[in-house]
Amino acid sequence: MKNEILSAKGKRMTLAQKDAMTGYIFIFPAVFGLLAFYIYPIISQFVISTYEWNVLSDPVFTGLENYITLFRDEIYLTSLSNTTKWVLFYVPTSILVSFIMALAMDMPVKGIGFFRTVFYIPVITPIICVALLFVWIYNKEFGILNYLLSLVGIPAIGWLNNTHIAIFSISLMSIWKWAGYNMLILLAALQGIPETLYEAAEIDGVTPFKKVWYIKIPLLKPAFFYIIITSIIDAFQVFTEIYIMTKGGPGYSTYTISYYLYSNAFEYGQMGYACAIAVVLFIIIMTCTLIQNKLLGKNVTY
């Protein structure tokens, strides 16, 4: 009898181990991807940033020299300034545009599904195609935007050639490209608000503006919290638009941190210095995310 009990326990242990093994097999691809494509690169960039390495020669340990050089580098400081301008302009403007679009797309109008599709099409359009399209639109000599302005007597503007407005011109293109994504998130959140709240508000004589201010915006806080964080993270890493449209020009007026990182790594071969830029960018994004979570997260209820 005792042997039978031990045998049964042994079988149960074997079944438990098989179940555990099955679970490990299923999570292995995700864990491997996380380690190989996220954790390992992050650790590697911290290590490489302490070396002077141009890929072709042996790395030379320099400690914090790359970081000291970084904050004396005028081009990097310009890139940091341009990236900050991009974030401060792009994030609030894109969220405001997305919110207005979501409110419009939430209206009970016949054929609204068609307009929702139209507004989302730029999101699924390849960024390279959109960037090249706007290079033509912004062209000072034959761009359609300057042509339309000329019809009302406004002289041609060098949207991508003027050092003062080039970064904002590219940012407007990016807002047009990605506004539909945040619109979709806000629209889904809007449609999750119970109709009974609107009905009660109508009984009390609440105006449409007050419905938005006192009902919709408070109940959209979780969605706003998400899109604010993701928008800031994406804005700090802007690269493709810059690379396609201006390559950092004119001068260094559209250099961003990500573009300067790319230039050092793949044009100049300064991999250690590029990794130092990546580490600082990582710290900036992490700090901003933690601050947002501290300031905004406590006011969000799900």
Image (spheres, helix red, strand yellow):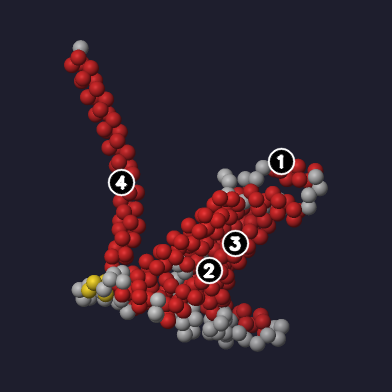
Name the side, left or right, on which 72 lies relative to 148: left
Q: Which of the labelled discs sits on residue 28, or is there none?
A: 4
Report the Cα–Cα distance between label 2 and label 3.
12 Å
Few, some or many residues within 10 Å of mark 2 (<14, 14–19, 20+): many
Task: Please state which amino acid type lies under the numbered disc 1.
Answer: Thr
Task: Please state which amino acid type lies under the numbered disc 2.
Answer: Val
Q: Which of the labelled discs sits on residue 87, or is there none?
A: 2
- First in residue order: circle 2 vs circle 3: 2
Q: Looking at the image, is mark 2 or mark 1 nearer the viewer?
A: 2
- First in residue order: circle 3 vs circle 4: 4
Q: Position of residue 191 (x, y in %)?
A: 63, 47
Label 4 SS: helix
Q: Are marks 4 and 1 in contact (CB under 8 Å)?
A: no
Quadrant where the C terminus sits is top right
Label 1 SS: helix
Where is mark 1, residue-wise? 196
Task: Please state which amino acid type lies under the numbered disc 4.
Answer: Phe
- First in residue order: circle 2 vs circle 1: 2
Name the side, left or right, on which 175 lies relative to 194: left
Where is mark 3, residue-wise? 95
Report the Cα–Cα distance between label 3 and label 1.
27 Å
Task: Please state which amino acid type lies under the numbered disc 3.
Answer: Ile
Question: Residue 197: in sight, yes or no?
Answer: yes
Report the Cα–Cα distance between label 3 and label 4.
37 Å
Residue at 65% x, 87% y is 155
Along the line of sight, which residue is nearer the eye, 112 or 216? 216
Q: Are marks 2 and 4 in contact (CB under 8 Å)?
A: no
Residue at 64% x, 56% y is 102
- First in residue order: circle 2 vs circle 4: 4
Q: Position of residue 257 (x, y in %)?
A: 43, 72
The mark total stands at 4
Q: Is residue 282 positioned above or below 252 on the image?
A: above
